[in-house]
Image: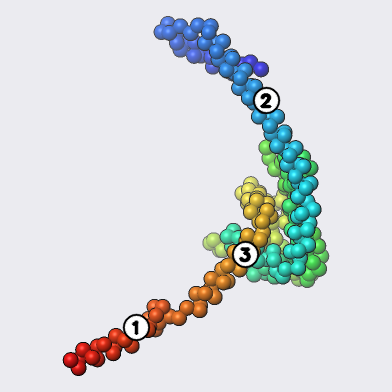
Amino acid sequence: MGLDKGKKQKLGEVKEENNGTEHIDGELVISIEKLQEIQDELEKINEEASEKVLEVEQKYNEIRKPVYDKRSDVIKSIPDFWLTAFLSHPAFSELLTEEDQKIFKYLSSLEVEDSKDVKSGYTITFNFNSNPYFEDTKLTKTFTFLEEGTTKITATSIKWKEGMGISNTDTEEKKGNKRSHTEESFFTWFSDDQQKDDVDEIHDEQIAELIKDDIWPNPLTYFFDEADEEDSDMDDGGEEKGSDGSEDDDGSEDDEYNDGNEDDN
């Protein structure tokens, strides 16, 4: 590819700076141009490698799909699986309100699907059983990576049942750092993105990445974390504590007995 205009200009500036003190001969120019050719060759190889990686990822996405489907079928037989997994995640445990948790009980399956070419985006889908909160049985959020480096975000507009719409509840005025119920709810993630600013869009992508990269690959890890915490609480509760909060009071009677014998002596 050779040196571009900017690099040639930079090389010319170096020549001017050294003019009169140290002569830069043509060999240096030739060496730099050769170096640029090598870098161009490496760049071409890297581009080819990236394409191969995408091809492999596409292939294995097809292989994973029926396995993910089989996993989803088994998960449906485990009560509150997704609710437990999300609540065990440090970020989502803070994000899900009590009302959100009630809605999550109707979540039957979760899906994360890359675009066909892998590199242009992905879609996250929440599948719900019939529930008293909204008409939808499927809520989706799609992230499309555009050529200019921005991300186009589209989401399902939730059709809330009468009196149940979290997005339709009267929002209280902000007081200090206190947020309204609408702002706190996880389901505002599906609200109209045209009304969101840049900070909200970044937050949208952060949530999506946590689902895509943390929970989706192995939700069982988080489900077991919750179970482990419950087991740990039971173990802590089962230990006998002394009246002063210590784990053992057995030595107290022996101490009193010994003290009494010492007095008799």
Amino acid at dot 2: Lys
Q: Secondary structure at mark 3?
A: helix
Q: Is residue 33 above or below residue 115?
A: above
Dot in front, 2 or 1: 1
The C terminus, quarter of image: bottom left
Question: What residue would you read off at disc 1?
Answer: 251
Crowding at mark 2 (Cα within 10 Å: few <14, some 14-19, many 20+): few
Residue at the location (66% across, 29% down)?
Answer: 46
Residue at the location (63% across, 48% down)?
Answer: 202
Question: What residue would you read off at disc 3?
Answer: 224
The N terminus, quarter of image: top right
Tell me: 257 left or right of 220: left
The CA distance from mark 3 to mark 1 is 39 Å
Percent across and percent down for residue 102 are: 70, 70
Percent across and percent down for residue 253 are: 33, 88
**Label at residue 44:** 2
Q: Which is more toward the observer, 7 or 256?
A: 256
Q: Which is more toward the observer, 20 or 196?
A: 20
